Image (cartoon, rainbow, N blue to C red):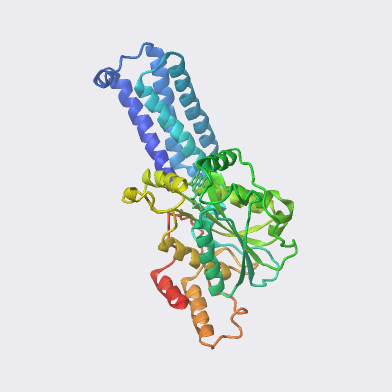
Amino acid sequence: MILRMLCFLTAAVNMGGNAVLGFAHEPIFAWLGVPPPGDPFLFSAVLGFSFAAGVLALVIALRPAEAAPLLVVGIVSKGLFAVLTLAAHVSHGVDWPWLVFAGWDAAFVGVFWLYLIHLQRPELLQLNSGVLVSGSARPRTRKALVLCYSLSGNVGRALGRVKAGLEHGGYECTMTSVVPVERELFRFPFRSVWAFFRIAGRAMFRRPAAIEPLDIPADHDYDLVVVAAQTWMVGIAAPVEALFTDERTRAIFADRDVAIVSLARGLWRRNQAMLASRVQAAGGRLVGAAAHSNPGREPARTLSLFIFLAMGKVGAPRWLGWFLTKQYLGDAALASLEEFGTRLALRPLPGQPAQVVAEAAVQDALDREVDAADGDADEDMVAVPPALTPRPQLAPIPVVSNSVHSSENTARRREEVRA
Ligand SMILES: Cc1cc2nc3c(=O)[nH]c(=O)nc-3n(C[C@H](O)[C@H](O)[C@H](O)COP(=O)(O)O)c2cc1C
């Protein structure tokens, strides 16, 4: 939704801005203190080109389902404009409004690119709306493997709650840590600021980090694998990437149901698309997805992340406390992840259509757990097929940062169970 709105925004700015400039560039340039364009033909060509880019963005926003080729055209044309303007500035200097236009277009290269990723994976739209898919036809053992790599503990907390949710749903879970071979480099707090730049630089070039063997055979009896990735330089973190490049760990996913969890400061979409592709390339059956961003608003959120990474702890320096945003998911996001775990445990059986697990089924699982805790456990707790609500039409509902799919009711019930 946000990406589509941004397409409408650039459509309005490109079309409206260029139309106004075309009719009234002289007073506007005079008002801005910028000399009039030297070459009126080149100026008109640039205005026309930019106006056309606005029309393109409008078509993309109006017809997203068919927009993939147009997005590629948009990325190339906006990128070209930004690069040519920068080159002109470097060679003989251009007036500042042109640099602003170039900056705008460069930013929209990123927006279009993210939108393209988003549109190319329509199944992720469904999964983000809370839909769960019946995966492999293998018998359900009701055992789950949760693979966790976490640098500062955010992913660790998140997966802890998914695990708790799975357990509420009757699953037996094993949480296994993914440990990089270069422990000294991938440790937090960093030994030096240089370590951050090494990790970030390697992440930019998508260099996986070797990981310790996991000692999980390919013929393991987990029917569900949950794997999380945090975003590092707009992609998945190197140690998580290594799970899919190492043949032994890659085999863990083959023909198993796999649920993915993506966490980031803000940019989780490419992370999610990459993680989904890696899982599917390894033969895993993608059954569910959850994604969350850290709390807070930009630009404070990005600056706070850098400060957190540099200082190695939250809330430091104290005198900046008023400005810093939180580096760990909030309670609502964690509760949503726990419910995601319970819903995963109750996901459709093989042969059943993709569905949203009904609130009532989640409640039921929690009630059963309370009964079990009271020594009144139902023998058939695991055998009972989950009560699922068929979703007649799988309309995509985009995920919202820190979104909560759970109702307050379920959250309250969960707290009771935890207590
Ligand atoms: C080296 C590095 C690069 C990062 N790059 C991004 C990024 O490009 N986009 C983003 O949204 N978050 C980025 N983050 C933030 C992490 O995704 C986020 O803090 C996450 O919660 C970390 O989880 P963890 O501490 O459990 O590993 C980066 C963090 C690190 C350490």
What residue lies at 72% left-to-right and 61% top-to-bottom? Answer: 215
Q: Is residue 285 left or right of residue 300?
A: right
In which quarter of the view is residue 49 placed?
Answer: top left
In which quarter of the view is residue 43 placed?
Answer: top left
What residue lies at 41% left-to-right and 60% top-to-bottom? Answer: 330
Q: In this view, does 54 lie to the left or right of 179?
A: left
Q: Is residue 384 left or right of residue 1?
A: right
What residue lies at 51% left-to-right and 74% top-to-bottom? Answer: 361
Quick one: 397 or 180, which is closer to the camera?
180
**Residue 17 seen in the current view:** yes
In the image as oriented, which residue stretches furthest toward the bottom? 376
The percent position of residue 377, horizontal first and vertical second, equals 56, 86
How many numbered circles does the render carry?
0
Q: In this view, does 338 lie to the left or right of 223?
A: left
**Residue 389 seen in the current view:** no
In the image as oriented, which residue stretches furthest toward the top? 38
Query: Does 271 sit above or below residue 18?
Result: below
The percent position of residue 162, horizontal first and vertical second, equals 53, 65
The quadrant of the image that shows the C terminus is bottom left
The percent position of residue 29, horizontal first and vertical second, equals 28, 19
Query: Does 301 sit above or below residue 69?
Result: below
The percent position of residue 21, horizontal first and vertical second, equals 32, 23
